[in-house]
Image (spheres, helix red, strand yellow):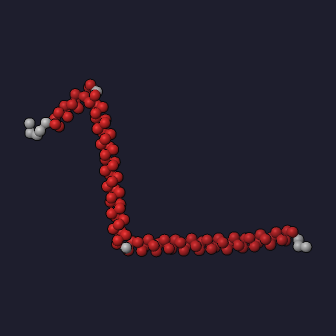
Amino acid sequence: MLDEPLLMNYRHSQLGQQLELLTFEIGRLRNELARFRQLRMMERLRNTRYQARLSLTYTIVSALGSVVGASVIFAIIIVFLSRLEAASLIGRFIGEIVRIARTPFPP
């Protein structure tokens, strides 16, 4: 019969060695993955088609965002100004501005 504490120490030492080996292997794989990502990024930066496609996509998305954002802001301003025209004090001033804007230039 083996001594129970001795057997436990042996098992712990085996697990510790396996854990160290796995930790080392994970670190090595992490470094390989980082190096692979850097190489892939460098390859993409050298590819002019990829750069052109990325630039075109960014431009289209940016333009659409600007158009939608401006439309929302102008809609809010129009709603706000239409509410102001209903007010009696500022309504005359806004009405005068609208009348001036609608008259052909020069009068």
Q: Residue at x 45, y 73 (%)?
A: 40
Query: In the picture, residue 60 is in which quadrant?
Result: bottom left
> Does residue 72 appear to the left or right of 27 in the view shown?
left
Tell which residue pokes out farthest to the top in this image.
88
- Look at the image and tell me in which quarter the C terminus lies: top left
Judge by depth and name the residue closer to the eye, 84 or 6: 84
Measured as percent of width and height from the top left, residue 15 is found at 74, 70
Q: Residue at x 72, y 73 (%)?
A: 17
Query: In the picture, residue 80 is in which quadrant?
Result: top left
> Does residue 99 appear to the left or right of 54 in the view shown?
left
Q: Residue at x 62, y 74 (%)?
A: 25
Q: Residue at x 35, y 52 (%)?
A: 65
Q: Is residue 53 above or below residue 84?
A: below
- Look at the image and tell me in which quarter the N terminus lies: bottom right
Judge by depth and name the residue closer to the eye, 23 or 103: 103
Measured as percent of width and height from the top left, residue 76 is found at 32, 39
Measured as percent of width and height from the top left, residue 24 is found at 63, 73
Tell which residue pokes out farthest to the right in this image.
1
Q: Is residue 21 above or below residue 83?
A: below
Query: In the picture, residue 11 is in which quadrant?
Result: bottom right
Measured as percent of width and height from the top left, residue 41 is found at 44, 71
